[in-house]
Amino acid sequence: MRCLRPALMTALAVLVAGEAPAWPANLVQCLARDARRLVPRSLARLIAEREVQVLDEAARFPTPLGQALAADLQAGRLQPETLAALDAQAVEAISLLKQQRVTEGIVRLGALLRVPADLSDPVLTAGPTGYPAGVTREYYAFVEGNLNKIPVVLDDPPALKLPRRDLPDYWQRLLERSQGYSGVILTEMYQGGRVVSHTRIDYRSPVFGVASLSYSRAVTAIAATWLAVWREARGDVTRMRPPRELLPRDAPPVRAPQDPVPSPEARP
């Protein structure tokens, strides 16, 4: 895959083994790397230098909080207690950074990617019953196999300017938007009582649309979460590259159809 070194992939796979379904380790690393492109260069560099620690910390999210988040994802609503606990994680990162405990603060800040990543994952919002066995595995295999075809777009530009106090409402909106995609995965990947292999799906399938939108949404949400915490910690927000807007090119002019030229045999 394009993002993860084999040794690190193996290590992270061990860390997440046995947990509830979520973005595979390789995709988590890719999400983090793409999100770094949306934050100031100073913050991107600090996170990149501690990438292994950040991903390790995200995989080791506090068990009670991880369980509460998973339950809320299934129920479709983030509870006030869960939001308070998530906010406490952000506050701790801010406190560490203000104390100049840079490595600890950056690792804690970086690990917050777990929250927006999970909230942007339609697999985790499929409801209490989830999917039939095999659907989740095949969906993630499809995303990983088509990652190089997925264009990363800025899902919500204003989100990059959110203050930390607005993160709870923003996170709830992420959850609600992800819920709208969960049914598409089930409809397209479980047909006739059988799981559809990811090898039988291509970019023309609605599954590709869901995967593409969810991936870009997660990238934007991770960057928005990092930035909200980083600004409150009085981090450097200079040298932040503005997102480049890509517009479709104007279509070429349509020429009027011309009369067919008769073949020599048809000419009088």
Image (cartoon, rainbow, N blue to C red):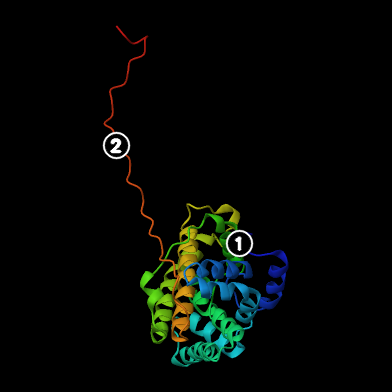
Q: 246 or 41, which is in the foreground? A: 41
For badge 1, the amino acid type reads Ala
For badge 2, the amino acid type reads Val
Q: Mark 2 points at which residue?
A: 254
Q: 205 or 16, which is in the foreground? A: 16
Task: Estimate the x, y position of residue 210 in percent, counting from the top left.
Answer: 47, 63
Using the numbered discs, state the Cα–Cα distance from disc 1 to disc 2 in whole angstroms: 41 Å
Task: Estimate the x, y position of residue 264 in percent, counting from the top left.
Answer: 36, 10
Q: Mark 1 points at which residue?
A: 141
Q: Is residue 62 above or below residue 2?
A: below
Left or right: 229 in relation to 257: right
Left or right: 165 in relation to 32: left
Residue pictured at 71% horizontal, 73% vertical: 11
Task: Estimate the x, y position of residue 157 in percent, counting from the top left.
Answer: 38, 69
Q: Do the residues labelled 1 and 2 touch (CB within 8 Å)?
A: no
Which secondary structure, mark 1? helix
Decide which of tag 1 and tag 2 comes sooner along the chain: 1
Q: Is residue 168 above or below residue 33?
A: below
Mark 1: few, some, or many residues within 10 Å (few <14, many ≥20)? some
